[in-house]
């Protein structure tokens, strides 16, 4: 499920600051390569794991440098399925979305400061 109207799409940040800000809010940079990175926040609810995922892409530099500038491309949410990864078509419970929106607001405030 794509999470719209987060205010994060298009925001830019240096890698070091984005890593620091994301970590403060509880996100972890799990997947990354030279030109893109994914930040995940895990939400446990009703015996299921949901992941709030933020995709970023380098617009200046490569991810091996802390001053690389990343742009946030998309925010989406999925339910973990074993062993296949994330399933994005399931309905997300209201409590999970409330937590996700709160975390996205916290991150946006840090990145706009």
Image (cartoon, rainbow, N blue to C red):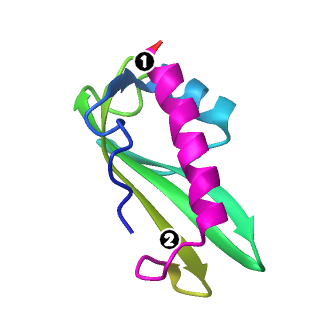
Q: On screen, 17 above or below 62?
A: above
Residue in the image at 66% along x and 63% along y: 95
Q: Is residue 17 visible?
A: yes
Name the one closer to the observer, 4 or 49. Answer: 4
Q: Which residue position is annotated with label 2?
A: 78
Name the one closer to the observer, 70 or 10. Answer: 10
Picture quarter containing residue 36?
A: top left
Q: Which residue position is annotated with label 1?
A: 112
Give percent across and percent down for residue 40: 55, 53
Residue in the image at 37% along x and 23% along y: 13
Q: On screen, 64 above or below 36?
A: above
Mark 1: give few (<14), some (14-19) or many (20+) Cα within 10 Å.
few
Secondary structure found at label 2: strand
Mark before the other along the chain sequence, 1 or 2 = 2
Q: Is residue 16 visible?
A: no
Residue 108 falls within the magenta-colored stretch: yes
Q: On screen, 77 above or below 104?
A: below
Give percent across and percent down for residue 77: 47, 64
Residue in the image at 39% along x and 42% along y: 6
Q: In this rendering, would 112 be left or right of 44?
A: left
Picture quarter containing residue 47?
A: bottom right
Picture quarter containing residue 44?
A: bottom right
Secondary structure found at label 1: helix
Mark 2: give few (<14), some (14-19) or many (20+) Cα within 10 Å.
many
The boundaries of the magenta stretch are 87-112
């Amino acid at each position: 499920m794509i999470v719209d109207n987060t205010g994060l799409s298009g925001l830019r940040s240096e890698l070091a600051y984005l890593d620091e800000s994301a970590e403060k809010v509880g996100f972890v940079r799990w997947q990354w390569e030279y030109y893109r990175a994914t930040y995940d926040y895990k939400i446990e609810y009703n015996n299921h794991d949901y992941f709030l995922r933020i995709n970023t892409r380098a617009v200046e530099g490569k991810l091996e440098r802390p001053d690389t500038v990343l742009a946030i491309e998309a925010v989406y949410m999925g339910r973990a399925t074993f062993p296949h990864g994330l399933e994005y078509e399931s309905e997300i419970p209201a409590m999970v979305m409330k937590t996700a929106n709160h975390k996205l607001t916290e991150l946006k405030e840090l990145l706009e400061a």
